[in-house]
Amino acid sequence: MAANSQRPGSFYGGAAPYRSSDGLSTRPGAASEEIQLRIDPMDLDDELTGLHSQVRRLKNIAQEIGTEVKYQKDFLEQLQMTMIKAQAGVKNNLRRLNKSIIQSGSNHIVHVILFALVCFFIVYLWSKMSRK
């Protein structure tokens, strides 16, 4: 590495000093370990104006996102309240239904069983008659 550092341009793998598109250029310095950079004067006002407009656009986008987040949050809170009210209504209706079933007695189960037996008996008779 010591042999390479004594040749001009050896820091860049033997390539000649170059000029970048950003306005920077390199020149071999007096000492082999030093690199000198020269910044070409350029119109930085245009660059700053461009950056300022981009930052302004990003700020507007961030504000729009914040507004949308607030809207979505309010919507979700309203939806949650609606669900809580619906849940309470269903719970109250189930409680009333259970009370009415208890008060009227549990004859509905007996009716369902009798209906099933009658249907089974009809299907049984129909299958016996269809075989003849």
Image (spheres, helix red, strand yellow):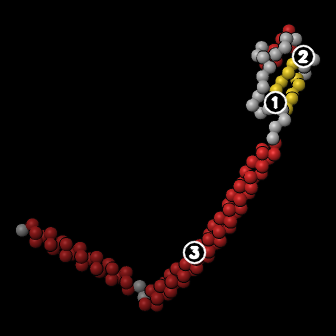
Is the C terminus in the top left, top right, bottom left or bottom right quadrant?
bottom left
Label 3 sits on residue = 83
Q: Residue at x 62, y 69 (%)?
A: 76
* Left or right of 31, for residue 59: left
Comparing 18 with 71, the one in front is 18
Tag in front: 2 or 3: 2
Residue 30 visible in rendering: yes
Q: Amino acid at mark 2?
A: Ser
Residue 107 in picture, x, y percent from top left: 38, 86
Amino acid type, label 3:
Met
Q: Please, what secondary structure does the residue beneath circle 1 have?
A: strand
Relative horizontal placement of residue 47, taking residue 81 as reference (left or right): right
Q: CA distance from mark 1 to mark 3?
A: 64 Å
Q: Residue at x 47, y 85 (%)?
A: 97
Tag of residue 32: 2
Which numbered mark, 2 or 1, is in the foreground of this view?
A: 1
Gap in Å between the C-alphas at discs 2 and 1? 19 Å
- Give the residue at mark 1: 24
Percent of width and height locating residue 77? 64, 72
Crowding at dot 2, Cα within 10 Å, few <14 / some 14-19 / many 20+, comes out as some
Q: Which residue shows up at 78% across the image and 44% down it?
A: 47
Let me know if residue 80 appears in the view. Answer: no
Q: Earlier in the sequence, mark 1 or mark 3?
A: 1
Tell me the quadrant of the picture where the N terminus can be found: top right
In the rendered image, the residue lying farthest to the left is 132
The relative height of residue 98 versus residue 52 in the rendered view (above or below) is below
- Which residue is depicted at the point 55% across and 78% down? 86
Q: Quadrant of residue 101?
A: bottom left
x%, y% of residue 14? 77, 14
Callout 2: SS:
loop
